[in-house]
Image (cartoon, rainbow, N blue to C red):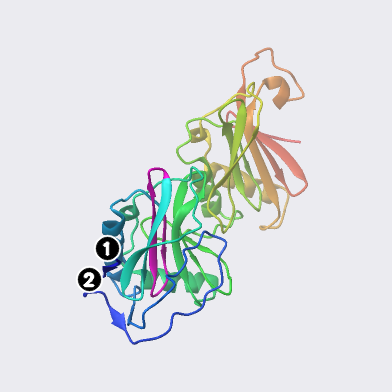
Amino acid sequence: MGCALAASLILVGCTSPATQSPTPSPSVSTPATPSPTAEADFTEPGAAEEVLDELVKAADSTRAVMLEFTESTASLTVLKDDSPKTWAYRDGKIDEATSDVQNQDQAVFDPYSFNLSDLGTLFKVAAAISGSDQNQRLQLVDYSGGRVLMTVTTNPESKTVFFYPDGTALPILDFNTRFGVEQGIEDASDSLPAIYSLSIDQQQVAVEYPGTDDTVVRRQRTPRVPVTTLTVPGDAERTVFSPAQIDGAKIWDLVQQARAKFDLKRDCSWSLRAEMKTPEEASASPSPSPKSELVLSFDVDAHHFTYSNGVVKYE
């Protein structure tokens, strides 16, 4: 027997649920025999949090692997004995539901760690960013590398909009601005104690760092998408450095100085790669010291230069 949802949920007039096409994310099936009762409106302030309480109560767990809302439906998938089990609100009641969510070692999260106090506002912000408010669907799910974010999608599909746990929208970054450079570096290197390299171009900020079993992990932040990770076979002989040594403001100042020096357009292309190098690798004039140093190698338009130990060297 399904458990009835608390009467204090906001209700709207009787309507048939809108038909929705499948989304790329795992989906939850609607119970086979819906009843023609009134629908909840989870876009009202507090309504999403209230039905979450009921879902958690029914599931008897906060070990979530997915949480999903539309305007009038909600579902929670939790791990029970390492198997995903789903409970869904449909047509005025909560029942266990079938789902194609699988246990693939995705992140387990506490749904109460996310700000769901006003689903309507999240949908409005997402519509302003994506340009569509048709059949909006909010999901909390492991996006990449164990990072759980809130996403809002539409049907027909438009741009996916990402939100941090506190409900603020992921900023769209322009890597031809100081803010874009600084934020991109912060996002890509977040919480990493040591990295092999950092690179920036117009499309992304990326870092590479040691993985397990002689692998290298590449973490990248693109303008509209949060950080994603990719693991590849690696070279254990590379030297690491702390990402705290990278100063985004200084990088931007060096790019601007090069543009001024060579009378370049303010939006001309540029790229950077920062990594540890020996003096022989960093310069055509070898140094007797074998000690590695952090070298930032820039290409601004057709001009190449390096920056290390406070010294700029133009070629």
Q: Which residue is mark 2?
A: 6
Is label 1 in a helix, a strand or a loop? helix
Measuring from the top left, give residue 138's x and y in whole percent.
44, 65
**Where, quadrant-wise, is the C terminus in this rendering?**
top right
Is label 2 in a helix, a strand or a loop? loop
Badge 1 amino acid:
Glu
Badge 2 amino acid:
Ala
Measuring from the top left, give residue 175's x and y in whole percent.
60, 53
Q: Give the residue at x 40% y 58%.
A: 86
Measuring from the top left, give residue 199's x and y in whole percent.
63, 41
**Where, quadrant-wise, is the N terminus in this rendering?**
bottom left
Neighbours of disc 2 within 10 Å: few (<14), some (14-19), many (20+): few
Neighbours of disc 1 within 10 Å: few (<14), some (14-19), many (20+): many
Snapshot quadrant of residue 43: bottom left
272 or 231: nearer the eye?
231
Q: Is residue 311 above or below residue 185?
A: above
- On whether residue 73 falls in the magenta region, the answer is yes
- On whether residue 72 falls in the magenta region, the answer is yes
Measuring from the top left, give residue 110's x and y in whole percent.
34, 50
Q: Which residues are magenta?
A: 66-82
**56 on left or right of 311:** left
Whether label 1 touches label 2, CB < 8 Å: yes
**49 on left or right of 196:** left
Q: Which residue is mark 1?
A: 54
Snapshot quadrant of residue 70: bottom left
Gap in Å between the C-alphas at discs 1 and 2?
Answer: 8 Å
Snapshot quadrant of residue 89: bottom left
Q: Which mark is first along the chain, 2 or 1?
A: 2
